[in-house]
Image: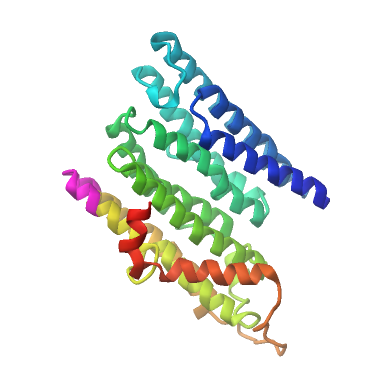
Amino acid sequence: MNHQAKLIFTISLLLGTAITTSSNHWIMAWAGLEINTLAILPLISKSHHPRAIEAATKYFLVQATASTLLLFSSMTNAWYTGQWDITQLTHPISCLILTSAIAMKLGLVPFHFWFPEVLQGAPLTTGLLLATVMKFPPITLFFLTSHSLNPTLLTCMAILSAALGGWMGLNQTQIRKILAFSSIAHLGWMTIIISFDPKLTLLNFYIYSLMTAATFLALNSIKALKLTTLMTTWTKTPSLNAMLFLTLLSLAGLPPLTGFLPKWLIIQELTKQSMAPAATVISLLSLLGLFFYLRLAYCTTITLPPHTTNHMKQWHTNKPTHITIAILTTLSTMLLPISPLIYPLS
């Protein structure tokens, strides 16, 4: 794919995201989502590999179904209430259909089946877009309609997402599938709090995007797609692997690192809302995710290949992507001390 085509698709992605996030009318939000879907499809299938074509087809079918449900939900609400404004979603059937549509867009349980398969068929850079940028418009719609949605249904979906995201990631050897199930588990944390403190959901999404971007770019730099490949990269880029180790632990939510901040605030808010049992369950389920993050971290740094190769270590590079990785990994690991500043800004 030439650079002009990539530029056009990237601009279309940004345009679609901007239209959806800034619109008040359901038709404009739907149009932005459609532009996003059509812009990402060529980026998924650009390798022309059968697996990539299959991933693009699955993505198109699922997103088209979700967009249809979203349009049907808004039309039903307009039929009964005469309102096309996104924040005026009041009809219960419309709210239920919209919850299903956004869950399908995001990959929440029970509409999660497509996400690991699509991420596995896409290149790492496109996978990064699918896991972060493409989730921003649906999260925004969740944010705008959070006061109308059923908290019990969202809590059930969130706990199931955290459980299934952790459980299904345990047995994987493909890194992209592990990161897909990690994304599903993180979406569970975002969904459980959205009815009570929507701003906390956005903060969680921003921090998750930061850590995921650092992880995907580091993996793309060392060209690692499987755990077996990851085991042999320490001798080539030890400093990058050490930073990847810390970023993975941050994704797991371990206390000294940035990833602990959203989990800490969410558990605190759930306890204030008299939902201590839900907070306890989702905290215990995050231990499943911790296991496969630790396995990834172990393969990244602690496992050494039996025969080390004699070649120059790539300590100093001038690639701009490496500067980006350095900035993202620093932010992914060291933002916890300034959390009193971050939370009011959100």
Q: In front: 343, or 130?
A: 343
**Residue 305 drawn in magenta:** no
Residue 332 is situated, as x and y percent measured from the top left of the image, at 46, 66
Q: Is residue 250 visible?
A: yes
Residue 343 is situated, as x and y percent measured from the top left of the image, at 33, 56
Give the farthest residue toward the bottom.
310
Left or right side of 4 for 74: left
Q: Is residue 244 above or below residue 69?
A: below
* Quadrant of the rendered image containing residue 161: top left
Q: Residue at x 59, y 45 (%)?
A: 117
**Residue 274 drawn in magenta:** yes
Residue range corresponding to the magenta coloring: 268-278
Q: Residue at x 40, y 19 (%)?
A: 94
Q: Is residue 299 visible?
A: no
Q: Residue at x 66, y 81 (%)?
A: 236
Question: Looking at the magenta stretch, what is its main secondary structure?
Answer: helix
Residue 228 is situated, as x and y percent measured from the top left of the image, at 60, 69
Left or right side of 300 for 170: left
Color style of the picture: rainbow
Instruction: Count the marks.
Output: 0
Left or right side of 116 for 46: right
* Quadrant of the rendered image containing residue 291: bottom left
Q: Is residue 171 above or below residue 335?
A: above
Q: Is residue 19 above or below residue 251?
A: above
Q: In front: 60, or 80?
A: 80
Residue 12 is situated, as x and y percent measured from the top left of the image, at 69, 40
Q: Is residue 75 above or below residue 212?
A: above
Q: Residue at x 55, y 59 (%)?
A: 213
